[in-house]
Amino acid sequence: MADEQNPATATDAVTRKRPKPGERRIQILQALAAMLELPGAERVTTAALAARLGVSEAALYRHFASKAQMFEGLIDFIETSIFSLLNQITEGPHSTQDKLRRMLTVLLQFAERNPGMVRVMVGDALVFENDRLQQRMNLFFDKVEAGLRQVLREATADSSTPTIDAQVKASLALSFVLGRLQRFARSGYKRSPLEHLDASLAVIL
């Protein structure tokens, strides 16, 4: 019959649709991030994730040893994306104030563009997961604060207490970012973390 498909052609079609090495891992992480954007999705089960992807749970575990490892993949993305940008800013020729403004803006822009990641960053998605995941996010923000302190030391060099001044200002700046992330997540992503940003940074910085 004219509409019968050649078995070889059908096999080729299936082969072409098969994900490339590493592609399925990316698809799994993208699906997990997308599910975290949904209301009330603080806890995503592997069963729900597998159903979204149209695969078995066993198929997920062929690419990740555990759900914790999936979250580690998201944290890898967060760290790589943000630290690469922050490093560019700190090494740039801008003034201290401009560097701080740019660093805080990068953090909040990342959040707005990646809502699902925000639940990981603020810890909502990690409550029922392995404790090391929350510890790793805590370390992430410790590193961000250290970067802010490094920049602020340049502006407090003439102070009688430059280290303390830099610590206080860096802590305040990071608290502002964390507050914006929390509000963004709690509002169901309706309150943009960039809301009145210039005016807010003018007050903080």
Image (tube, helix red, strand yellow):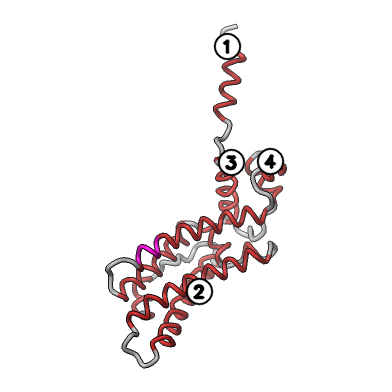
Q: Is residue 174 above or below residue 128?
A: below
Distance from Cα at disc 4 to Cα at disc 2: 38 Å
Q: Is residue 33 magenta?
A: no
Distance from Cα at disc 2 to Cα at disc 1: 61 Å
Distance from Cα at disc 2 to Cα at disc 3: 34 Å
Q: Secondary structure at mark 4?
A: helix
Q: Quadrant of residue 87?
A: bottom left
Q: Residue at x 56, y 38 (%)?
A: 21
Q: Amino acid at mark 1?
A: Asp
Numbered badge on residue 3: 1
Please report the bounds of the magenta region as a residue range: 85-89
Q: Residue at x 37, y 79 (%)?
A: 152
Q: Amino acid at mark 3?
A: Arg
Numbered badge on residue 59: 4
Q: Is residue 115 above or below residue 202?
A: above
Question: Which SS type dominates the magenta stretch?
Answer: helix
Q: Amino acid at mark 2?
A: Gly
Is the residue under label 1 in contact with that under label 3 (CB below 8 Å)?
A: no
Numbered badge on residue 179: 2
Q: Is residue 87 magenta?
A: yes
Task: State which tag comes first along the sequence, 2 or 1.
Answer: 1
Mark 4: give few (<14), some (14-19) or many (20+) Cα within 10 Å. Answer: few
